[in-house]
Image (spheres, rainbow, N blue to C red):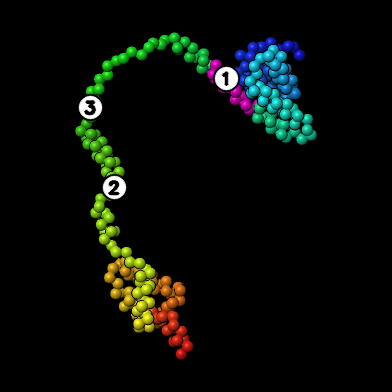
């Protein structure tokens, strides 16, 4: 193998060196001959070490990576080796394309930095000179005012009905119904529900009846609209009779 002649500044990294070797020896970038490229790459790295050059860790990491690919390539099953080679080929192709694009961009923008000058102050006219139709100004004002209005909190009137409404607790109605049953033994369902003083009271009474039926503290006696709410003890007595 010929002694490599190069300058370290020519290689911006391990991929740059690999791409140089592939181009120089006309290797297939899509199917890298790993045994050949390992020898060439390590020869360059070894030459850099012999000349006491400051080698970036990236070059040594790539050398270790290539040696590992070469090692697994010697195994009977080379599935991992082929996968690693495809991964390395993809990185090299992407690096090559980006390098070519950067070169073309550099050529197309050459000389742009020759026509520069220090910035100079200038007077700005802050007078608004555009003309608008009155209808457009009105629409813009309505739109802006509408957005500000939507950000404002709701008026107090929106909460007055909620605050003024008395919340009736279901537990309170359960206690009230049980006291009535302790005194009378049974209460007509229709009379109990219709004696509610508000919608919240009515809903609380109905939920109280359902909750007591669920816990079997009360039973429903009768059918149709004229049924009664009976205490559990009273229902058991009727069943015994």
Q: Are marks 1 and 3 in contact (CB under 8 Å)?
A: no
Label 1 packing within 10 angstroms: few (<14), some (14-19), many (20+): few
Q: In this image, 198 relative to 72: left or right?
A: left
Residue 180 x/y as whole percent: 35, 79
Q: What is the C-alpha distance between the residues marked 2 and 1?
A: 58 Å
Q: CA distance from mark 1 to mark 3?
A: 51 Å
- Please give the residue where the numbered disc 3 appears in the rendered image: 131
Q: Residues within 10 Å of mark 2 (few under 14, many from 20)?
A: few
Residue placed most toward the observer, 13 or 31 = 13
Residue 32 percent location from the top left of the image? 70, 24
Marks 2/3: CA–CA distance: 35 Å
Q: Which residue is mark 1?
A: 99
Front residue (pair 56, 187) = 56
Q: Main secondary structure of the magenta part?
A: helix
* Mark 2 vs 1, N-terminal side: 1
Asked which secondary structure carries label 2, the reply is loop
Q: Quadrant of the N terminus?
A: top right
In magenta, the rendered stretch is: 89-103
């Amino acid at each position: 193998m010929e002694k490599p002649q190069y300058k370290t500044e020519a290689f911006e990294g391990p991929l740059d060196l690999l791409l140089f070797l592939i181009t120089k020896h006309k290797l297939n970038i899509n199917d890298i001959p790993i045994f050949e490229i390992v020898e060439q790459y390590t020869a360059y790295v070894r030459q850099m070490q012999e000349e006491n050059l400051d080698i970036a860790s990236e070059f040594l990491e790539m050398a270790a990576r290539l040696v590992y690919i070469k090692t697994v390539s010697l195994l009977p099953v080379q599935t991992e080796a082929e996968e690693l080679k495809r991964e390395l080929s993809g990185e090299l192709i992407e690096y090559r394309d980006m390098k070519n694009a950067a070169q073309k961009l550099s050529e197309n923008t050459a000389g742009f930095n020759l026509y520069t000058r220090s910035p100079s102050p200038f007077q700005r006219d802050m007078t608004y000179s555009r003309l608008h139709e009155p209808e457009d100004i009105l629409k813009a004002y309505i739109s802006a005012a509408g957005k500000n209005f939507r950000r404002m909190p709701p008026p107090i009137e929106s909460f007055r009905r909620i605050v003024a409404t008395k919340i009736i607790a279901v537990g309170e109605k359960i206690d009230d119904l049980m006291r009535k049953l302790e005194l009378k033994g049974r209460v007509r369902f229709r009379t109990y529900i219709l004696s509610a003083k508000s919608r919240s009271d009515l809903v609380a009474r109905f939920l109280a009846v359902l909750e007591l039926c669920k816990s079997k503290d009360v039973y429903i006696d009768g059918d149709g609209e004229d049924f009664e709410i009976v205490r559990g003890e009273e229902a058991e007595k009727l069943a015994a009779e």
